[in-house]
Amino acid sequence: MNNKIKYISRSLSVMGRLLLFILLTNSSINSFSQNKTKKVIRIEHADSLVSDETVVAEARRLIGNVLLTHNNIVMKCDSAWAYAKTNTVDAFGNVHIISNDTLNLWAKYINYNGNTEMAKARRKVILQDPSITLTSDSLDFDMNSEVGYYKYGGKIVDSTNTLTSLIGIYYTRDNELFFTNNVRLQNESYDMTTDTMYYNTETQIATFKGETQIIGDSTYIYGTGGWFNTATNETELNKKSTIKRKQTQIQADYLFYNDENGEGIARNNVIINDYENSMIITGQNAKYDDFEQYALVTDSAVWMQYYQGDTLFLHADTLYTMPDTSAVDAKMLKAYNKSRFYRTDIQGICDSLVYFTNDSTIKMYNDPVLWSMENQMTAENVEFINKSEPPNEVYLNNNAFIIQQIDSTKFNQIKGKNMVGYIKGESLYRIDVNGNGQSVYYPADDKDYIGINKAESSNIILYLADNMIKRITFVGSPTGVMNPIMNLVDADTKLDGFNWRINERPNNRFEIFGPLSTTPAATALPETEMIIDLPNINESKIELQKQWDENLQKLENDTTSSQIINQHSKTIKQLTNKAKD
């Protein structure tokens, strides 16, 4: 027998067994007596022990039911190398570390340093504590600070969520995890991917940075920073954020959304798309409810409805949309304070209005003014009905007044209690005056205007062509006079209450914020083409799974850690066979 090799086994005599006991219980004391500042690793048990100076100084080979202790940890394994000089251990086969009776670490191989209290676990690694279960192919765990990290892929499972990433750190004392590179969080309701994430196992809140997608059964969320509460399904997004649920999409610099009740808040550069009703709302502040289908938008609020190649632009201090209960899948818009709207064929201003998306009806209140081509219409309240089949209708209720400009000095005028105007295309072709009808009308021949007709009748019907009055029918007993233009004085040319308000008219979509003469021009307004096609939710899930499977395959192909473990395993196997011989 080689004088450098001393072999001890259970087949030895009583004296041999006593010597083995002394070696097992006191080897750590004898071997590490010089280390006064670090507690040494104790060898509590092994079926057999070999001391081999040819491998490394003060090396011990432990085989069979190995049990080691150090500070507050217990380590079990099939076999191990213990290095007294460095106070380290290489443990192989069913390695199990128990720390403080609450944390368990399993692996095929673990290198443990008693001086630094660092455990480096490789192959089929499992870390388990009362909060989570972590699995990986490679994990380094600091038993002193109770912090573990992996850099070749890992998975964490808690009571509700499964989290995976290429790189991760677990702070067990703080119940916090840090993930980066291909981070993914999955539960029954959502599939979330991001670049960087912090996750607290107690609060179940995930804080993320970088491009992030959260995909649910009917919800798509995108952002580049914020947090997601996996317990309450609440989300806060801080940058370039988008939430899409069914037929509604919301974009803003800041978004808060609760998927349990559908309520949310949006701030700064808010854009709400309602695809079903072909409408968009923009502003700087918004509150919305997906379940009740309402939205309240303020601060530079603009509402747009696009159809048939044209768009209605509307601005007011406050815009409020809600379901229209009189029609299926239709919306109703309420605009409050300083309402102004523009479409190529019709423009208007008032204090407040109501708009119905089902038939494009507009109801205007408090000093309303409506313009169509050369016509200005006013009343105490105005209702414009945009029918699917022409003609469209304009109802002027109480103190109705229509002014039609001929030139800078001549105006056709119709006044009455109530009026109904009929529109085909973009042209007003008939006006019915009901009650207290009055008119000022400039008839013309083929060459020029021949005079002014000023008349009164209880009811009047006016017929127009090319937006100009061509014929008047008086119903009842009219009174009137025809005067030559040269004999006119101003009193004869204006009806009582005449007020030509052309300077208040929005002439383009930018003037919905006010006339350019009094209001700075807007640099830009959202176009109707702003609709962003988000990815199909089911297709996105498939693509995310595909990407993750490819990343896992790359990890399987990484042979660095497996080569080290296999080399040690072969050595232990040879020693075990020698012991049996």
Image: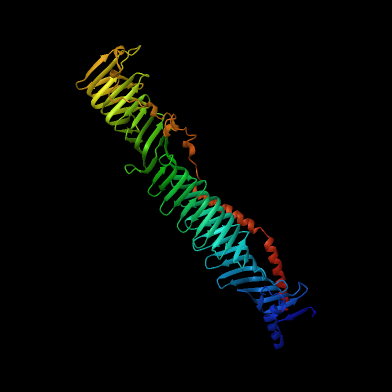
Whether residue 308 appears in this view of the structure is no
Q: Is residue 352 above or below residue 119?
A: above
Q: Is residue 515 left or right of residue 163?
A: left
Q: Is residue 371 above or below residue 142?
A: above
User: Quarter of the image holding residue 501?
Assistant: top left
* Colour treatment of the image: rainbow
Q: Is residue 428 left or right of residue 129?
A: left
Q: Nearer the viewer, residue 144 or 518?
A: 518
**Residue occupying image coordinates x 33% and y 35%:** 364
Whether residue 184 appears in this view of the structure is yes
Q: At which x and y percent is residue 48?
A: 69, 79
Q: At which x and y percent is residue 155?
A: 57, 61
Q: At which x and y percent is residue 89?
A: 68, 71
Q: At which x and y percent is residue 509?
A: 44, 32
Q: Nearer the viewer, residue 118 or 35?
A: 35
Number of dots carrying numbers: 0
Image quarter hosting the N terminus = bottom right
Q: Is residue 552 left or right of residue 60?
A: left
Image quarter hosting the C terminus = bottom right
Q: Nearer the viewer, residue 572 or 399?
A: 399
**Residue occupying image coordinates x 63% and y 71%:** 95
The furthest residue to the left: 477
User: Quarter of the image holding residue 351?
Assistant: top left
Q: Is residue 35 left or right of residue 249?
A: right
The furthest residue to the bottom: 14
